[in-house]
Amino acid sequence: MNASRIAAIGLVAAAALWMGSGHLFPPEPEQSKAAIRSGTAETKKPFRVAVTEIAVMPHARRLVLSGRTEADRKVTITARTGGVITELNVKRGTRVKKDDVIAILSDEAREAQVVQARSLFTQRKTELDAKRKLIDTGALPRLELVNLEAQFKAAEAAVAAAEAERDRGVVRAPWDGIITDVPVDVGQAAFSFSGRDIAQLIKLDPMLAVVEVAERKLGGIHVGGTADIRLVTGQTARGRIRFVASMASPQTRTYRVEVEVPNADGAMPDGITAEVTLPMAAEPAARVPRSALTFSSAGDLGVRTVGADGKVAFAKVGIVEDEQGYMWVSGLSDNAQVIVQGQDFVSEGQTVEAVSAAATEPTASAAN
């Protein structure tokens, strides 16, 4: 009985305390909660990103191709008449000038034929001079003059032919160059009908750097443009495009392009592998750090920019040229503020605090 009474008294006391708590600890007004939420929002700052201002300018792409060097001229010097080689003045590596004597063939009576032709020429000339006076006086018919003049012209032509045949016995260099091969020796016979090779001559100045360009990349490459050449040996040079083929190779569907390179000292050899950098047509482009490139939610490649209102926007770009650490891209407007740090942590339409990337560099250096 006593226990039940005590429990009832306890329940009544607890209910009284619960009812009185509303008067002792009144609820917090809604205005206060709103003020707290407003104060919290005011203290939250926009996300900070680093931006750089880009400039759009004409930029010529560079096409890098692997090719080879070729001598400007190559010729195999052959015997143009019969005889035995009696004198050989060159060997491999000999530098020759135009009209230098390379080899001499045996006479084979060629000088005698010249003497005979000259004698006949003198005879015909004397006859023509003597009988011309008689013809002028009417002692001989006028038709005789025509026959004498024809014989004289024939004798004159015979002298020229005999002298030309004699001169063929002396083999000369057609132009300046270097002898690369001499497949004969003194005492060997040479015959004009077999075209005996005497020597091989190449011209190394200028040297040509030759590449094959695909049809899709041919636009913008024109005669007169400059090109940079780098040999496999590390030697570098600059040349001028002198030839662009108008017809593609049937096998490769590529076009031959020749770059003329000065090579007065002959230091650039023939047939060596060369890397040729050709300039392409210039187009408007901007240079941005490679790290600034990102992808949109739709999968497009581009960069994120900050507008004058501080909001983030995405700009789709096209690749013009790839450099180490930087990219030349198209599709950006001049003086655009490109996000170079923090672009992967913001989204389009978000308001951010943009600071110059140059201002953040000292801080980053100090941290390192």
Image (cartoon, grey):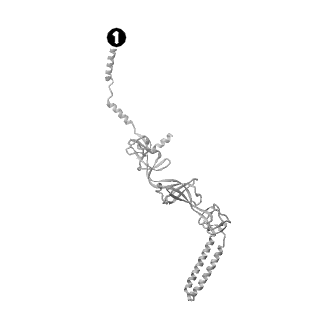
Residue located farthest toward the front when viewing the structure as drawn: 193
Q: Is residue 47 above or below residue 329?
A: above
Name the residue nearer the viewer: 112 or 59. 112
Asked if residue 87 lies left or right of residue 206, the reply is right
Place of residue 192 in the rendered image (x, y in percent of width and height, measured from the top left): 62, 68
For image coordinates 57% across by 82% down, the residue present is 147
Of the 4 image quadrants, the one containing the N terminus is: top left
Place of residue 190 in the rendered image (x, y in percent of width and height, measured from the top left): 64, 67
Place of residue 18 in the rendered image (x, y in percent of width and height, measured from the top left): 33, 21
For image coordinates 34% across by 14% down, the residue present is 7
Q: Residues within 10 Å of mark 1 (few under 14, many from 20)?
A: few
Q: Is residue 50 above or below residue 138?
A: above
Place of residue 152 in the rendered image (x, y in percent of width and height, measured from the top left): 59, 80
Residue located farthest toward the top when viewing the structure as drawn: 1
Q: Quadrant of residue 96?
A: bottom right
Asked if residue 113 lies left or right of residue 367, the reply is right
Q: How many marks?
A: 1
Residue position marked by numbered label 1 in the rendering: 2
For image coordinates 48% across by 43% down, the residue present is 362
Q: Is residue 333 above or below residue 134?
A: above
Name the residue nearer the viewer: 30 or 80. 80
Amino acid on which the number 1 mark rests in the picture = Asn
Disc 1 secondary structure class: helix
Name the residue nearer the viewer: 235 or 118. 118
For image coordinates 47% across by 48% down, the residue present is 327
